[in-house]
Image (cartoon, rainbow, N blue to C red):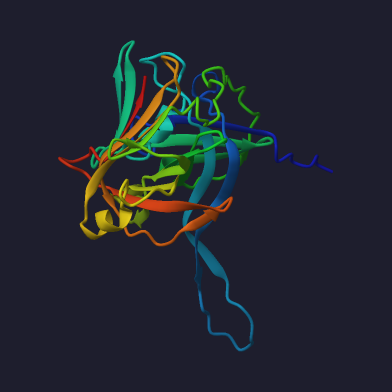
Amino acid sequence: MAEPLKWRSKVLLAKIESEYGTDSTPTGAANAILATQVELSPMLGNDIDRDLETPFLGPSAMIPSELHRQLKFRVELQTAGTAGVAPAWGPLLRACACAETIVADTSVTYNPISDGHESVVIYIWVSATRYRMLGTRGNAIMMIDAQGIPYIEFTFTGLYSPATEVAQATPDLTAFQKPSVATNSNTPSFTIDATEHVLRSFQLDLANQVENRFLIGDESIIITDKKDMIRATIQAVPVTTLDPYSLAEAQTEVAVEIVHGTVAGKIATLNAPTCQVMRQEGLENRQNLVEWPLRFSALPASGNDQWTLALT
């Protein structure tokens, strides 16, 4: 009898494709990803009913179609530890319709792009079973919650290929730095319209529209649209200080920015300079204090500039 497969035994690799849908052969030494909360859907698609007419009752045979895989996981939102060095999770964000700009010894900056979307090959082992995803693109949500580890949550869709039994790669995870918890001292600034506010939770959802396009002559995963949205729960203040109701009614645009990290080489600054304040839908009671769940639509100004994530 075969040994049972251990769920905790996983290896995840990801590498940018030089040609769409062609295996760029990631390795454990160069392309390992340190992930948490992994969810794998290995064989998504449709079942086509042959709907055969027979002299007896019962189901008809089915044909699987539009086969693809989906993988969801989180990585810790932490820099490479050195200014001007891209983080090991950089290829993942690039596969979510983002550009990566490196200024040596200074910064690495990510921003959304409308064209020229890159893709990655993903290998994920669960025990000795390897699932390969070609032509993979996806969505990302950046999350910073008080007293929690900042994360980027990725949901990737890739082309299907058969699972195989292959010895696990040996991952080198040394490029992943230890994270710092989001606290008053570690996260020194959260501002709306350049005014500091007390923050409970923050989330930037790229809201990429990821489509499976399975046609004769072309099978691909594409990103066709995006609706970047920020959600932030803050401690309520008098409307003379911040009036989200009037701002929403007037369709006002404000800048939203959060800075996590205080040491050079370990600072992440997420800035969205032209956010439309959306309707405030309710109040929250936290410890018998009023908190506001706010929503902002991160709008482009001149294009592909609705937000930046700068690592310095």
Q: Is residue 250 above or below residue 54?
A: above
Q: Position of residue 305 (x, y in %)?
A: 23, 37
Residue 25 pos. (x, y %) = 47, 27
- Residue 142 vertical placement versus 52 (above, below): above
Q: Position of residue 264 (x, y in %)?
A: 41, 14
Give x and y (percent) for residue 304: 22, 39
Residue 134 visible, this orientation? yes
Residue under the point 58% across and 46% down: 39
Which residue is at the front of the view, 41 or 37? 37
Q: Residue furthest top?
A: 105
Q: Is residue 209 visible?
A: no
Q: Is residue 1 above or below residue 63?
A: above
Residue name at image x 47 percent, y 45 percent: 155
- Quarter of the figure with the C terminus: top left
Along the horizontal axis of the image, is 241 left or right of 176?
Answer: left
From the viewer's side, name the closer residue of 206 and 6.
Answer: 206
| The N terminus: image quadrant | top right
Please state the total of marks drawn on the protein image.
Answer: 0
Q: Quadrant of residue 9?
A: top right
**Quarter-wise, where is residue 115 in the image?**
top left
Front residue of this view, candidates 14 and 287: 287
Q: Residue furthest left?
A: 302
Q: Nearer the viewer, residue 242 or 30?
A: 242
Q: Residue furthest right?
A: 1
Residue at 38% x, 32% y is: 17
Tell me which residue sits at (64%, 87%) in the image. 56
